[in-house]
Amino acid sequence: MTILTSAILAKAGFLHAFPTRDTVDATLLAALTSPTVIQVKQVHGARAVLATEAAGQEGDALVSRAGDGAVGVRVADCVPVLVADPASGAVAAIHAGWRGVVGGVLGAGVKLLGGRDLVAAIGPCIGACCFEVGRDVAERIGFIAREDGEKAHVDLRAAVRSQLRALGLADGSIEDVAGCTRHEGERFHSFRRDGANSGRMLAAIVPRGRGR
Ligand SMILES: [Zn+2]
């Protein structure tokens, strides 16, 4: 099984996927039953874009409404977050690196998505075990798991969950799909481990329903 999934998203009826390093495009598209996955140029910012207006755009959150196409974000250490509105069928795919988390990309994505009683899955990303940054960066993010002189280990996953909670999601409606990209080299790509030649994994989700 090369694709990881969220029980919460599946139960709400949303096709989605957190690929691993072995997932080929054909397997991903088959899991999504989609001919393609709409993406934008990711820039570690905090801009949310509608799937219908994505062509040629830069952004780090993509929202797709019922009847529109699958959306996805490419990650290798950054946090992939898939959010869905069970009432409307709309979804968001969010690329949340530390700059995006600090800059508010989760808020931008959730606000463009709209709706209440949202459900979300936080995918495999660099864990607090491996995410070592300078003290200045750590203090900007918060969620310091361990301090080590001028360095600190930060729990990005916890930061994402906290922001989703602040945006109104119930704690029980947010699922962690486990995995540390940095030290689980057999399962995941990692930018920190493999450098600029690292592969990326395309976390993706499909809106539900035919639209209104
Ligand atoms: Zn780790």
Image (cartoon, rainbow, N blue to C red):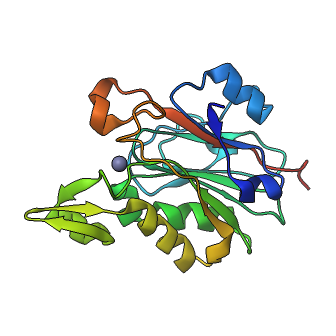
Question: Is any atom of residue 52 visible in this view?
Answer: yes
Question: In the picture, which quadrant includes the N terminus?
Answer: top right
Q: Is residue 17 above or below residue 128?
A: above
Nearer to me, 197 or 115: 197
Q: Is residue 150 left or right of residue 105?
A: left
Residue drawn at x 18%, y 67% as measured from the top left: 147
Q: How many numbered marks, from 0 up?
A: 0
Give how far across and how far down residue 76 sits, in percent: 42, 38
Name the image quarter holding residue 34.
top right
Question: In the picture, which quadrant includes the C terminus?
Answer: bottom right
Residue drawn at x 28%, y 38% as measured from the top left: 192
Q: Is residue 89 above or below residue 170?
A: above
Question: Is any atom of residue 169 visible in this view?
Answer: no
Residue drawn at x 44%, y 57% as measured from the top left: 46
Q: Is residue 96 left or right of residue 37?
A: left
Residue drawn at x 55%, y 24% as measured from the top left: 22
Q: Is residue 152 left or right of residue 127?
A: left
Give how far across and how far down residue 58 sits, in percent: 47, 42
Give how far across and how far down residue 90 sits, in percent: 76, 56
Nearer to me, 181 or 25: 181
Give how far across and how far down residue 194 sits, in percent: 30, 29
Furthest-left residue in view? 149
Q: Is residue 27 above or below residue 78?
A: above
